[in-house]
Image (cartoon, grey):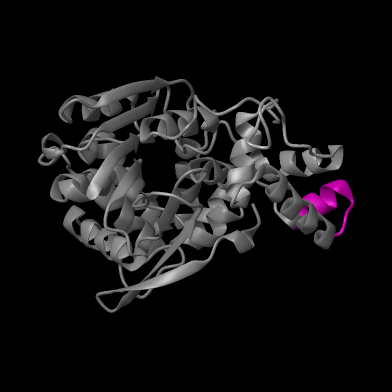
């Protein structure tokens, strides 16, 4: 997906600007609230773009950076409590002009997503929680929490490397270096410390029982950052929540078997995941597949892998203009409204 497909907008919140973006078409699905994000830098990652594209196949995916981090106003400190996080999320939904949403709360973002669902039951269709927890105090023993906070505050360079071992355990050396650089660019040492302190202080036990929206809780069995038992604990605290165990050790949902998370999420949201036609049939006619040339199929495979037009052009030794034209033709042949939808079609059709 080309970075041009993402437009970053800004909402005013207590005198500070909050960066947010929306991709795709359909009912709104809001993602955000995790401690370290950057709308622009995230979007440059092929794995992240593919993950977001899958969720955006039949939804408008809305993302945002918390104040003090990412592309949001850096002059203000990050929120320090769940109530402050909730106020930010309320500002973003108002700016996006949506009155009813589904929420995807990952990692520490699960706290604010579940609080929004508890406080605004009439505004939430469905709640999806991934890799999250109820009490930050349960994430690690007190001494370990204090040690990590200290190293992040005093030596952000070292702290970002320690965190990379937790968040991307299967990464190559170069991928780990990239993530370390991402963290440093996404947050100052002060903002990183404040955000991590809030992660440990967060306590959702008082509101999880008040969530009434249909809820899906997913957690990877060997997640190194947040223990599997903590995800199951969240599911047990939410009335009638459905719990899904996933395989893998990666904490970020766009790493590892990200497709499994996209499939579970979309099926829960009511998307046509199981009912979509196979590669040999499409709306172009009963029993007929849309005709794509071999070159168009090559381009579509790379689109689905999250490559930009410039990256595809370099890969296939084409001009960027030619790739752009191929993508436009592919969307027209598939009858889909966006690049994200084309990528989702490729994934469903087994093209990659």
Nearer the observer, 175 or 104: 104
Classified by dominant secondary structure, the portion drawn in magenta counts as: helix
Residue at horizontal 15%, vertical 28%? 239
Nearer the observer, 24 or 44: 24
Q: Position of residue 59 (x, y in %)?
A: 45, 47
Examine the image and state in which quarter residue 266 appears: top left
* Residue at the extreme front: 286
Q: Is residue 274 something that shows in the picture?
A: yes
The number of callouts visible is 0
Q: Position of residue 294 (x, y in %)?
A: 85, 37
Nearer the observer, 221 or 22: 22
Examine the image and state in which quarter residue 226 appears: top left
Q: Is residue 45 something that shows in the picture?
A: no
Q: Position of residue 81 (x, y in %)?
A: 19, 56
Which residues lie in the magenta part? 310-319
Left or right: where does residue 55 sit relative to residue 151? Answer: right
Q: Is residue 93 magenta?
A: no
Left or right: where does residue 64 sit relative to residue 110? Answer: right
* Residue at the extreme right: 317
Left or right: where does residue 334 sit relative to residue 111? Answer: right
Quadrant location, the C terminus: top right
Left or right: where does residue 232 sit relative to residue 341? Answer: left
Residue at horizontal 50%, vertical 26%? 275
Q: Position of residue 139 (x, y in %)?
A: 28, 35
* Residue at the extreme bottom: 15
* Up-down relation of residue 122 to residue 234 (above or below): below
């Amino acid at each position: 997906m080309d970075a041009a497909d993402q437009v970053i907008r800004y909402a005013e919140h207590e005198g500070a600007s909050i960066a947010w973006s929306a991709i795709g078409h359909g009912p709104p699905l809001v993602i955000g609230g995790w401690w370290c994000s950057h709308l622009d830098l995230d979007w440059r990652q092929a794995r992240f773009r593919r993950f977001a594209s899958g969720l955006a196949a039949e939804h408008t995916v809305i993302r945002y950076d918390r104040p003090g981090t990412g592309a949001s106003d850096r002059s203000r400190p990050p929120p320090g409590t769940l109530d402050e996080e909730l106020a930010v999320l309320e500002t973003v939904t108002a700016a996006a002009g949506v009155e009813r949403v589904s929420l995807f709360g990952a990692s520490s973002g699960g706290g604010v997503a579940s609080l929004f669902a508890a406080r605004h039951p009439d505004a939430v269709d469905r709640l999806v929680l991934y890799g999250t927890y109820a009490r930050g105090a349960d994430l690690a023993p007190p001494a370990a929490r204090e040690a990590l906070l200290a190293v992040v505050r005093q030596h952000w360079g070292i702290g970002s490397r320690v965190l990379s071992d937790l968040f991307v355990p299967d990464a190559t050396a170069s991928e780990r270096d990239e993530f370390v650089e991402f963290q440093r660019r996404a947050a100052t040492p002060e903002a990183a410390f404040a955000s991590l302190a809030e992660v440990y202080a967060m306590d959702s036990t008082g509101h999880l029982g008040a969530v009434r929206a249909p809820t899906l809780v997913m957690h990877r069995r060997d997640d190194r950052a947040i223990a599997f038992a903590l995800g199951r604990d969240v599911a047990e605290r939410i009335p009638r929540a459905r719990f899904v165990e996933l395989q893998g050790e990666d904490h970020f949902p766009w790493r590892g078997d990200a497709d499994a998370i996209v499939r579970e999420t979309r099926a829960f949201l009511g998307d046509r995941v199981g009912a979509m036609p196979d590669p040999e049939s499409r709306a172009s006619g009963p029993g007929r597949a849309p005709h794509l040339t071999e070159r168009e199929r090559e381009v579509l495979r790379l689109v689905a892998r999250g490559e930009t037009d410039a990256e595809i052009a370099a890969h296939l030794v084409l001009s960027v203009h030619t790739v752009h034209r191929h993508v436009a033709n592919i969307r027209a042949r598939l009858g889909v409204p966006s690049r994200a939808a084309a990528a989702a079609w490729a994934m469903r059709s087994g093209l990659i």
